Amino acid sequence: MNFIAFVEGPLVWIAFLTFLLGSALRLLLFFTLSSKKDKPVYRFFNLKWMLLSIARWLFPANVDLKKNPIFASLGYIFHICLLAVPLFYSAHLMLWEESRFKWSWWTMPDHWADWMTLTLLAIALFFIIRRIVLPGVRIITTPSDYLLIVICALPFLTGYINTHPDGLSYQWITSALPIYGQYGTTIHIMSGALMLIVVPFTKLSHWVLFFVSRAVTGMEFGRRNYPV
Amino acid sequence: MSEDQYPEITISPEAIKQAVSTRMNARLKMWTRICAHCGLCADSCHFYLAKNKDPRMVPSFKAQKLKELVRKKGRVDENYLQSLYDIAFGDCTVCRRCTMYCPFGIDMAVMVSTIRSILTSQGVAPKGLQDAIKNYQESGNQMAISEEDWVETLQWMEEELQDELPGATIPIDKKGARIMYTVNAREPKFYPQDIQLAAKLFHVVGEDWTLPSKMGWDDTNLAMFAGDAKTAGHIVQLIYDRAVELDVQYVAITECGHAFRSVAFEGPVWLGKDYPFKVVHSVELFAQYIREGRLEFDRKITEPITYQDPCNVSRNGGLADTARYIIKHIAEDFREMEPHGNHNFCCSGGGGAIPMGPPFKRRRMEAGKVKADQIKATGAKIVICPCHNCYDQVNDLNKEYNLGIKVKSFKEIFEEIMHIPEELKAQEEEDLGEGK
């Protein structure tokens, strides 16, 4: 099996399985440890406060939107682009349809995908600059915070370059890195795989633990009879 | 040696490692892992705002020290412990305001409390808290007041009160009373008038109440702020025992914030059981009296009034609206601080900052600037504080920042304007209008 075939086959499997099983394991680890050491979580379990807290922060109905409207809004837009483009981009759907699963669902017009990709990249750049510029954010920033922004941005950057072969970015990268012309798609798949693989091992695990953490805190304040 | 240095100890890496690992539960592990370091918590903190946005005051920075501590596996030196001590006890009042602004709901105050708990387990805690813990263990109250002195104070207050309201009593150990009232040990020690005011109010509204003579009358819990869960649980257990012995329906908490949090919310966790009685804070009780028409007022206060939401009464007690219900009945010119309610800023005297003593006073005066500015902006002349810590802190801020205000508890306001039926008053009251 050559390198390209490995990336397009087994690596994609490894990435998806690591992402899904790793995330499931994160949840499992929380529930096994908490059943021993966090008994109040279960004792004061309350569906209403749990769901309210999740909903207020999953959707823009929370206090941060008022306190830091620009950063909070960009946060939402970033996440929407991050999820929507990989899931609903037409060329990705073709791959699902051709796969053994034969899955198919709604796709977005390609120019949407273009704009959302550029938006995400711009916000990613803003996040990096913000971390450098604001002392209050810089002090809590670790090298992995920068690295993870880059890891999340790479699939979008390579995706954009690859789908615009007449564009400036493609010309620029193929002149700087001639091998890119041949391996563009492979590099794109590798960057996507990398992003999925790091999820369970980093703060990106918040894609599942967000719900747990919000639930726990929502119920804790729910004991005081108000939603947070 | 700086005066806010921690008490000397011998560092035991093994003991620290053990203390960390027993405390790291699933929530704390999750929170150290998922914090995105986004910085949205920064300007929610009064320390951050008061210290000109000093980045070391960002809540996440303080809370994530827990992650660092886990990674160090007990390999720490004196300087490191001193820095943790400064952060956990000196730069945070565990008010939980930041928790409300974290998109993930990371409870940073609980993380800082955990650092406190680890430090305290190694003897690294402010002397003021350590002394209080010893007092709780020996005498059941933070001020080491003997049972004899406690009962004598009650009798003295009862006698004084009877000069004004002949029928009023301070019932001690009355079995089957509706409520068992508990107080802050500062009351018998420094403000016995507070107990008298409560007794007066209870008499006027016709409450069936009692106070226990034995340990369990002090509802404060400074062990909670030191993170000493064992002593903290012991303190609540004493209250539990007295309430069960006296067979009361309610345990009422004096106008003290953290006592309410301790007994009502943390107590059931420490004891691992539910109570056969309900816990009510004074604010709730007073509102109930007004609602039932048992507490009426001759007039409203005309001077501008503002309300200091104690963190452990509003944000951590859920009584922000209840307090405002009372205020509606007593204040003509009520002015809210901005922000207020559940989002109010800590006065900077909470989290044990006042009992930590003189070494920490400079810090709480500095951090209290946010509160002082808030109060100033309202233009109020009276600040109501239904919490002993807020009360003392706002008084200190008043001096420090020349606020020109009077600090009052709800009971003190009631004392001025409460309607007392004629038949309850002592006779020979011809010159009643004199004081007006």
Image: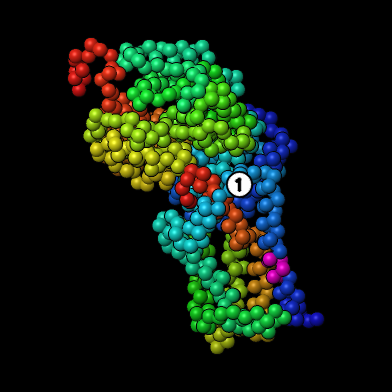
Q: Residue at x 27, y 30 (%)?
A: B297
**Secondary structure beneath label 1:** helix
- Taking the magenta stretch, the answer to whether it contains residue A16 is yes
* Quadrant of the snapshot with the N terminus of chain B: top right
Q: Residue at x 51, y 20 (%)?
A: B175
Q: Amino acid at mark 1?
A: Val
User: What secondary structure is the stretch in magenta mostly built from?
Assistant: helix
- Residue B7 in sight from this viewpoint: no
Q: Residue at x 50, y 59 (%)?
A: A55
Q: Position of residue A15 (x, y in %)?
A: 70, 70
Residue span colored magenta:
A15-20
Q: Nearer the viewer, residue B325 or A123?
A: B325
- For mark 1, name the chain: A
Q: Is residue A122 left or right of residue A8?
A: left
Q: Position of residue B115 (x, y in %)?
A: 60, 40
Which residue has dot 1 on it?
A: A41
Q: Residue furthest front?
A: B176
A44 is higher (above) or lower (below) than B434? below
Q: Is residue B303 left or right of residue B225?
A: left
- Residue B208 in sight from this viewpoint: yes
Q: Position of residue B327 (x, y in %)?
A: 32, 37
- Taking the magenta stretch, the answer to whether it contains residue B397 is no
